Amino acid sequence: MKKIFLIALILMSFETLVAQSSGYWQQQVDYKMDVVMNVKNYQYKGKQELVYTNNSPDTLKRVFYHLYNNAFQPGSEMDARLQSIKDPDTRMVNKMKESRIKTLKPDEIGYLKISNFKQDGVVANAKTVGTILEVTLVKPILPNSKATFTLDFDGQVPVQIRRSGRNNVEGIELSMAQWYPKMAEFDFEGWHADPYIAREFHGVWGNFDVNITIDKEYILGGSGYLQNKNQIGYGYQDAGINVVYPKNTKTLTWHFYAPMVHDFTWAADKNYLHDLVKGPNNVDLHFLYKNNSEIIDNWKALQPMMVYVMDFYNKKIGNYPYKQYSFIQGGDGGMEYAMCTLMLGNGKFEGIVGTATHELGHSWFQHILASNESKHPWMDEGFTSYIEDLALNDLRVNKKENPFEDSYKAYYKLIESGKEQSQTTHGDRYDENRPYSISSYYKGEIFLTQLEYVIGKENVSKTLKKYYQDFKFKHPTPNDIKRTAERISGANLDWYLTDWTQTTNTIDYGIKEVKENGNSSKITLERIGRMPMPIDLLVEYTDGTKESFYIPLRMMSFEKENPSRSVGTAIKRTVLSDWAWANQTYDFSISKNKNTIKKVTIDPSRLMADVKQADNSYEIK
C-alpha cells in the first residue's frame, strides 16, 4: 500500500518544487515515531526521528518544537488565560467558572518531557519553555540542505479539557491530538513558535511514519493509512481476511503512514464500532463511534450523507486528494485534523450532521489549503462555514433563499456590542471568546458571501476552484485569495481585503431622498459608513414592473454582470456612472414620475453587510 501512496507523494512533491522555482518556498518535515502507550496510567514513551529540509533562503541557527501537552498544567499560559478572560470556554471551567486546569493533580496533567536530543547524531542544547522546546543547533542548517533530529519523549495524556485528552464527556478513552513534539513552522514571516494558549494551529508540510503500540483490546482511528491492516483487523482488513492474533498476544502495534500532511492525530477506545463506507473516487470513509444503542442509528444515517457531502465539496472546490477520511467520536466538540475529525457523537442527529459537515469541509480549508489558523482564523473557519452552509442547504428539501442569514445576524450583533476587533488580531489576543468566534466563523464566511455581491456568484465559484488548484499543499495567505479573485474577475479588490479584514470599518449606505423632478424622479443615496461598496438598486413600480440599477465602485475598475440573469429573472438593468469613495452622496435620475414608484431598495439580495438597514429601502405611500 505504501508504494501506491509514494506515487501520489512524488506528484505532490513535484508541485512543491515547481512552486519553489517560482519564488514560493516552504519547509519540509519527515517524521518517524515509535510510541508505546500505557493505558493503565495514560503515560507513553516515544522515539522520534525527524528529517528537516530547509527550503528557505535563510541559514537556521535554532529550531523550535511545540509541546502542546504542557498547556494542561496548573500555572500554564492556558490556565492563566482561563482565569483572566471575561467569557472562558465553558468546557474548560467548572460550574463556578474556575479553570479546570488549575486544580489538576499530578497524575491528571498533561506533559511532554524531551531527552537525548541530537542533531545528526551530536547532542544539541534543547530547553523547554512552557509549551515550546527551544533548540540551539550544533551546526547551522544552510539553505537547501537537511538535518536529522532525534529525540526521546515521555508523555502523559491529560484529563480531557480542550481538544486532546483522556476520558472525554462521552467516555472516549484517548483523544490524541497535539500529542507529540511537533516542529514549529518557519516561513517567509519567520518562526511561528506560538505558545499554546487556546487557539488553533500552523504546521509544516511533511510525511508521518508512526508506530503505536497499545493493548490489543483498543481500536484506533486517525490520520494516514494503516500499513498492517491485515494483521490488525478491527474492520480495516481486506475482504475475506480473517485476522487471528498469536496466542498470548497482549499488545498490537498499529503502523500508520500519512503522506503530505501537516499533523498526525489518532484516537483509541475499547468500545468503538468501526464502519467502512466507500466515498467518491473510491475514498474510504471510516466511522468510529461508541457501541451505544442510543447513538448507533444516528451514526449509520450519517454515513450516506457524508458520501454526498464529500462529493458536493469535490465539485465545489476540487477533488479530495487522499484515499481515506475518518469520522471519529472523540475530543470536546468538533475539531479538524489531517484526514480525520474528532467530534462529539451523542447529540441530536441534526447537530451531528452539522458538525461532521463542517469538519469535513476543513479538509479543504486547512488541511489542504493550510492557512495559518492562529493569525488568520477567519480564512479556514469562515471559508469552511461558507461551504458547510451551501452543503447543508443543498441537503434540505425546502431550500433557504439565503442560507447565510444567521451569519449576518451574528455579525450585526457583534457590531452593536462595540466589541469587534480587526481580523488581523492574533487568535489568542482577542479580548473575549465570543467576538473571536463571530469574527472567525461568521465575518469570515461573509467575506465570501459578500464577495458574491461584489464580483458575482459565478466569479466566486471560479475563484474557489482556482484558489484550490493554485494553493493546495501550500500555505496561502489572505492576499492569495484576494489575488485569485482579482485574476478571475478582473476587478481591483485590495480595498475589499483591507477594509473588511484589516480594519473595523463598517458598511452603511442609505436612500437619502426620492424627489420628483418634472417628468422624472431624482434618487439620492448616501454613504454613511467608512467601507465602500458598489451598489445594486432595485426600483419597483406601481404597475408591478421592476428595474435594477448598478453603480460601480470607482476604485474597483470593474462592472459586474447582471445578477438577475444567473437566476433566470433577467430584470432590466441600467449601469450608471461610478461612485468615487470620497463623495458621500450620489444622485441619479429615472425617467418616471415619483407617483409611479412603489419602492426603492438597496441590495435586494441582502448579501451586502450593511449594518443599519432601516434606510436601505424607501417606500412611496
Image (spheres, rainbow, N blue to C red):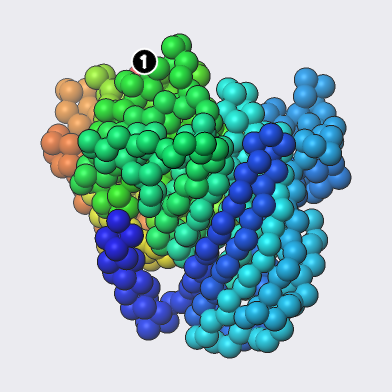
Residue 132: % across, % down? 73, 60
Residue 78 occupies quadrant: top right
Q: Is residue 213 left or right of residue 160?
A: left
Q: Quadrant of the C terminus?
A: top left
Q: Is residue 194 left or right of residue 439?
A: right
Residue 568: % across, % down? 13, 36
Front residue (pair 175, 91): 175
Q: Specify the amino acid type for callout 1.
A: Asp
Q: Residues within 10 Å of mark 1 (few under 14, many from 20)?
A: few
Looking at this view, name the residue that lies furthest to the top: 294
Front residue (pair 201, 604): 201
Residue drawn at x 50%, y 80% is: 55
The residue beneath circle 1 is 297
**Residue 72 visible here:** yes
Residue 240: % across, % down? 22, 36
Residue drawn at x 27%, y 28% is: 304
**Residue 402 visible here:** no
Q: Secondary structure at mark 1?
A: helix
